[in-house]
Amino acid sequence: MCGIVGIFLKDPKLEPELGQMLSSMLCVMTDRGPDSAGFAVYGAGTADHVKLSLRAAAGYDFEALARSLSVSAGGAPGLSVRATHAVIEVPAAAEAAVRAALATDHPEVALVGSGARMEIFKEVGLPSDVALRFDLSKMRGTHGIGHTRMATESAVTTAGAHPFSTGRDQCLVHNGSLSNHNDLRRVLTREGLTFATENDSEVAAGYLTWRMREGATLGEALKAGLDDLDGFYTFVVGTESGFGVLRDPIACKPAVMAETDQYVAFGSEYRALVDLPGIAKAKVFEPEPATVYFWDRAA
């Protein structure tokens, strides 16, 4: 049992409040996942730069890391530090060189995700503590997703916390269990994807990345997953411009959505949504089984 939440803003006036809204939703789901928590926020960014979300041990000197990467990055990278995580921003043309330098010279630093706009933060601990540690309530953006984890099939570690990101500006949170993730991991590995954990949710993220790399839209990738992913699942997925939801054909995992003129929101339970503005007048509904829902700010 885990808790998942997500919000996609239609109204730009709400963007300064995204973090506060997402934080409230995440913390309400504590009893569905007290082991660890994480979130992804899509904020400001440019197409010619990439943000690398990094994680290291408490007290790590990220400023020294940034200085050491300046040659690979073609200059001092932008740096934002939040507790055990940091986001460095480098020219997109330098991304491969910076990744290589991280892998070779800084194996103690984990690369959590990358993208023009996406930033990912996750840690072991109660969702309220994680949200406070990373100052989620003060973040702004267009959309975000979050997860509270109750580990059932793997250890309680930061690496095993959600969201999982396997592609640029792509991430996924998952409530459920995939029965064919080991076979699918082998297939995707042959297709060139790499995985940092044994978690089935990371395989689901990798599957969508692979489908989209082959030319599918997020909606098409999610639809294909209905044939290729075995098990019980509810997914909430983020991309640079959009927000998608999919439940398996049986839909045994709880899910509820709310839509207004200002936003679309998702929660494992309705109580995650009750503090959102205008919720009393929202269209509230349960997403249908085996049905892809997707909203895109570019549409």
Image: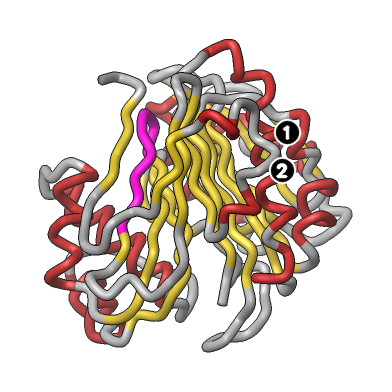
Residue reaching furthest front? Answer: 281
Between 23 and 96, which is closer to the camera in this rendering?
23
Quadrant that contains the N terminus: bottom right
Residues packed near mark 1 inside 10 Å, few (<14), some (14 to 19) or many (20 plus): some
Q: Are marks 1 and 2 in contact (CB under 8 Å)?
A: yes
Residue drawn 57% across and 71% down? 2
Question: Which residue is the site of mark 1?
Answer: 20
Name the mark on residue 23.
2
Task: Describe residue 286's horizontal placement relative to residue 135 as left or right.
Answer: left
Range of residues picked out in magenta: 239-246
Q: Is residue 36 visible?
A: yes
Residue reaching furthest top? Answer: 13
Could you say where residue 80 lies in the image, as x and y percent from the top left? Answer: 73, 32
Image vertical order of residue 251 relative to residue 101, above or below: below
Task: Describe residue 233's horizontal placement relative to residue 119 as left or right.
Answer: left
Q: Main secondary structure of the magenta part?
A: strand
Image vertical order of residue 288 relative to residue 75, above or below: below
